[in-house]
């Protein structure tokens, strides 16, 4: 007699929502609407005859039954992903990398030609969507993430950190100088990056500057847009060295202060299990670590 299983789509909704503790985040990750996730999970609860989530105004949490069931569902998806990756047709697939768009355009992309020269038969797929990656269920081989410390359960290797300093266009700098020829941050329009964990609040605190609304100003959802806004004279952004070094070297941007702050976060390479079983994956990892080591040396 065949096993009776709930619909796979409902289980996928449940796994994502349970892992992220949010219907909205699960919907964004799976590229569906929050309503679809909610209805799918309601249908799953009705089919199973148990409540999987506690829905409260302050957030979403798993019931005891839901937490127990999530372990089985997550393990099942993990086994499916591992089994798929071990198929002969999948072992020669593309090297799947997840990273932020600014890191991809400013650091990874300029170096990929060298990797392709060494490994011309290797294919690389870069995903810059802003979603959490679950290894191995999402099918990625590597993820490059900003974090203060490595997370448990996966292999994390530190690539390099950042130095934070305010930057603006040369023309804009002239408009916010005080009588001593220094930039008066109280007169400047602040340019913010919404997802950044360290931005103006961290820098102003480190510089011991008070009397400024650290939340006021222009807001963008990527570092690249914030840099572009600063280049066009819209205000002062928090530059992130060494990623901002090309603009500083060309003069498109200048430092608005001599005060720099060493970021608590750093770029980390997160590797999936079984990287050593594929020559192209291990070659990509070794190449990326060597490039980051050389980059750290050039930046120092």
Image (cartoon, rainbow, N blue to C red):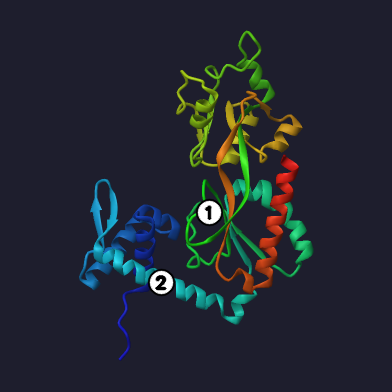
| Residue at image location 66% in from the left, 41% down from the top | 243
Q: Quadrant of the N terminus?
A: bottom left
For disc 1, the marked residue is 129
The answer to whether residue 300 is above or below residue 173 is below
Secondary structure at badge 1 equals loop
Name the foreground residue: 182 vs 235.
Answer: 182
The residue sitting at the right extreme is 117
Q: Quadrant of residue 33?
A: bottom left
| Residue at image location 64% in from the left, 20% down from the top | 173
Q: Quadrant of residue 242?
A: top right
The answer to whether residue 188 is above or below residue 153 is above
Name the foreground residue: 295 vs 220.
Answer: 295
Give residue 71's position: percent from left, percent from top.
Answer: 35, 68
Give residue 101's position: percent from left, percent from top.
Answer: 59, 49
**Going from the N terminus, do you reach mark 2 or mark 1 first?**
2
For disc 2, the marked residue is 75
Query: CA–CA distance between discs 2 and 1?
Result: 25 Å
Secondary structure at badge 2 equals helix
Q: How many marks?
A: 2
Give residue 153's position: percent from left, percent from top.
Answer: 48, 62
- 300 to the left or right of 19: right
């Amino acid at each position: 007699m065949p096993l009776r299983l709930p619909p796979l789509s409902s289980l996928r909704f449940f796994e994502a929502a349970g892992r992220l503790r949010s219907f909205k985040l699960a919907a964004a990750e799976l590229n569906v609407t929050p309503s679809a996730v909610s209805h799918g999970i309601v249908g799953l609860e009705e089919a199973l005859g148990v409540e999987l989530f506690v829905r409260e105004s302050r957030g979403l949490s798993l019931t005891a039954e839901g937490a127990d069931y999530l372990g089985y569902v997550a393990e099942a998806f993990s086994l499916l992903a591992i089994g798929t990756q071990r198929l002969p047709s999948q072992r020669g697939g593309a090297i799947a990398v997840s990273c932020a768009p600014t890191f991809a355009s400013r650091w990874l992309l300029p170096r990929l030609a060298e990797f392709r020269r060494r490994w011309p038969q290797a294919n690389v797929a870069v995903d810059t969507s802003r979603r959490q990656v679950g290894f191995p269920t999402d099918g990625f081989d590597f993820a490059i993430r900003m974090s203060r410390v490595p997370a448990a359960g996966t292999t994390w290797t530190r690539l390099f950190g950042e130095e934070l300093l305010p930057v603006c266009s040369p023309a804009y700098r002239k408009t916010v100088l005080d009588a001593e020829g220094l930039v008066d941050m109280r007169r400047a329009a602040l340019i913010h990056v919404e997802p950044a964990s360290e931005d103006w609040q961290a820098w102003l605190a480190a510089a011991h500057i008070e009397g400024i609304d650290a939340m006021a100003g222009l807001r963008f959802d990527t570092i690249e847009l914030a840099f572009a806004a600063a280049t066009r004279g819209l205000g002062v952004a928090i530059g992130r060295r060494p990623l901002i070094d090309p603009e500083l070297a060309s003069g498109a941007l200048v430092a608005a202060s001599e005060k720099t702050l060493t970021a608590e976060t750093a770029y980390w390479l997160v590797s999936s299990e079984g990287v050593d079983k594929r020559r192209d994956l291990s070659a990509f990892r070794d190449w990326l670590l060597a490039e980051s080591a050389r980059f750290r040396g050039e930046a120092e």
